[in-house]
Image (cartoon, rainbow, N blue to C red):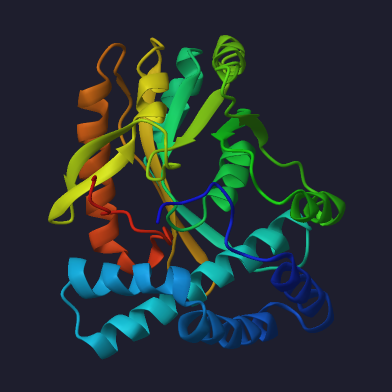
Amino acid sequence: MSWNGKSKTSLFWYKVSVSFLRLFGLKATYILVRFISVYYALFHRTTNKFIYHYFRIRFQYSPFKSFIKAWKNHYIFGTTLVDKTVLFADLKNNLTFEFDGEENLRKIKDDKMGGILVSAHMGNWDIAGNFLNNRIQSEINVVMYDKEHQQIKKYFDAIYKKKQMKIIPIKEDMSHIFGINHALTNQELICIHGDRFVEGTKTMTRNFLGEAARFPAGPFAIASKFDVPVVFVYAVKEGASHYHLYCTAPKIYKGKQNEMMDDYVISLEKMTKKYPEQWFNYFDFWKKIA
């Protein structure tokens, strides 16, 4: 089983969380998320088995500890969705941030070249993107598969008050390349996630957490076409309301797709070892190629 390009979170849970937030506030909503995450850990077996195996096999945890870690993974994921809603709907909150490597992004902006941020499905990129928008005053464009359920998009468009990041949808005709080029020409930032692929797309194999795993070739092929600096960025949750952002030193990889992927995998492995419960990939990442 591979990822199908759609979020696993249903519209029902979004509506429940938003309504609960408005009625009872953030702390009470976190309590609700605890119960929802128990449901996912116990009954959402199609995806939960992969995150369980991630802890059991990659980190060699006991069966019981792996189950607890899988539950905590679902819980943290749920709280990041709540935090995103709080921030974009402009609801009262006490979220705080710290940033390691802010100077790296400021250098990209000051050099007026535009730049590419390669991230992962770890922590809370949406909150990081909003924070970066406000902090360094640079437009951020997220390149992604545009297969989220349209009803969820419409619902969030209605409740979000703050400006969201721009989306450049990946198209089969490769027209997204023109959108990326246009944004970089305007000295904007491009964000691409490098840790998730759709079956049938080109992948490249790297050793990751002790075993060969497939990574999407597309993001790295795209990023290596442009003569602009590339950084790896992550935003992870530390504590109930605090986020820690990381940004590596900028490097230009034009024509060096393999080198970029090597550096990215090393970076991602370092982050998953430091924050194992905050990697949110609910499919068989280490699936063997037939």
Q: Quadrant of the C terminus?
A: top left
Q: Quadrant of the N terminus?
A: bottom left
Q: Residue lying furthest front in this view?
A: 290
- The image position of residue 287, as x and y in percent, is 27, 53
- The image position of residue 123, as x and y in percent, is 46, 58
Taking depth in this image into account, of 17 and 286 the one nearest to the observer is 286
Work out whether residue 286 can be spotted: yes
Taking depth in this image into account, of 54 and 134 the one nearest to the observer is 54
- The image position of residue 260, as x and y in percent, is 26, 27
In the visual, does 57 lie left or right of 68? left
Task: Tally the numbered discs.
Answer: 0
- The image position of residue 38, as x and y in percent, is 52, 86
Can you tell which quarter of the image residue 238 is in? bottom left
Identify whether 5 is placed above or below 52: above
In the visual, does 289 lie left or right of 69? left
Residue at image location 43% in from the left, 81% down from the top: 71
Residue at image location 47% in from the left, 34% down from the top: 192
Residue at image location 65% in from the left, 68% down from the top: 82
Identify whether 60 is placed above or below 32: above
Identify whether 149 is placed above or below 230: below
In the visual, does 85 lie left or right of 107? right
Identify whether 7 is placed above or below 62: above
Can you tell which quarter of the image residue 118 is in? top left
Residue at image location 42% in from the left, 20% down from the top: 222
Work out whether residue 239 can be spotted: no
Can you tell which quarter of the image residue 116 is in? top left
Q: Residue lying furthest left in this view?
A: 210
